[in-house]
Image (cartoon, helix red, strand yellow):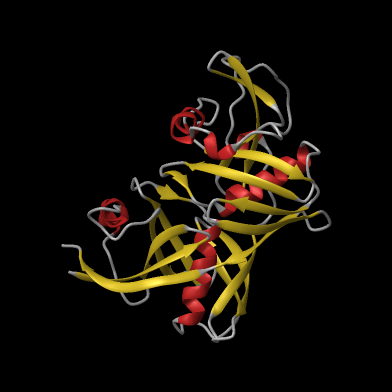
Amino acid sequence: MKLEFTKMEGCGNDYVYVNGFTQKVKAEDKSALAVKLSDRHFGIGGDGLIFINPGKTAPFEMEMYNLDGTRGEMCGNGIRCVGKYIYDHGLCEDTNIDVESAGKVKHLVMTPGSDGKIASVRVDMGAPILDPEDIPYKRTESGIQAFGEGPVVSEGVVYDNSIVDITAVSMGNPHCVIFCDKDADLDKMDISHIGPFFESEPHFPKKTNVEFVRVINRNNIEMRVYERGTGETLACGTGCCASVVAGVLNDYTDREVRVRIRGGELLINWDEAKNTVFMTGPATEVFSGTINIY
């Protein structure tokens, strides 16, 4: 079977996209297909696989798989690219659309460039989830220095014989946000070694994405991310949102912040009145093609 695909990226967070309106892949084959197509040596290469399908509660659905074949609930960079694909490929003529992912609907406002194709997308990512049970985050006595009820803000976790403060946020997927010293050099951090420890930290029963953040000032931060089921990526939209929410909760940042990631920059705004997080950033189509999958 030949499969048509489009490679797209948002700030370097790249996925293989498949039009689920015109092509059908068996549900039981999708996980293995994500692993195959995401391989950067023997496949197309990417951080995962995304199907653009007819939705159940919205006109469109983003069905996301990580590069290890596990299902992902939400990807901020991915959903911006989904919006661009929908408009640029004629699935919809409206620049304001709703897209569901894992049962949650996100509203997208898209801005065309001079060529008439979508250049930037603003996504209403919804309210941040701070209730530990809903993140999910399990408070136990093992490894935790701070206890209590309510949001997990600067709670201590034992790592390498020291205490690391973490803040837990969900943006439809769990995030463990770690603030580094202001003079820290994030480029020199061994994320491939540190990331897996926190990804599988037992207080996160479904594992977690991990953000390492340096605060530049109250309106600018830089971040590196280790994504659950994928490893380090050049960008993570939900991770940028979670980092800003965590920055506000810790009184490190204001509510509108530019987040510098390895693949570019996103503008994040946690609207106080609406209690919703808006994410604005680019979406780019890289190339299209066909590949034999069976």
Query: From what the image shows, is residue 265 above or below residue 243?
Result: below
Quarter of the figure that contains the N terminus = bottom left
The residue located at (58%, 16%) in the rendering is: 143
x and y, in percent, of residue 86 in the image: 48, 76
Most foreground residue, 116 or 4: 116
Query: From what the image shows, is residue 213 above or below residue 143?
Result: below
* Residue 284 in the figure: left or right of residue 155: left
* Residue 90 in the figure: left or right of residue 67: right
**Residue positioned most to the right:** 273
The total of numbered circles placed on residues is 0
The residue located at (26%, 61%) in the rendering is: 26
x and y, in percent, of residue 18 in the image: 35, 68
x and y, in percent, of residue 15 in the image: 41, 60
Quarter of the figure that contains the C terminus = bottom left
Q: State which quadrant residue 2 falls in.
A: bottom left
x and y, in percent, of residue 83 in the image: 53, 72
The residue located at (48%, 32%) in the rendering is: 190
The residue located at (66%, 52%) in the rendering is: 259
Most foreground residue, 68 or 151: 68
Q: Is residue 71 visible?
A: yes
Q: Is residue 210 visible?
A: no
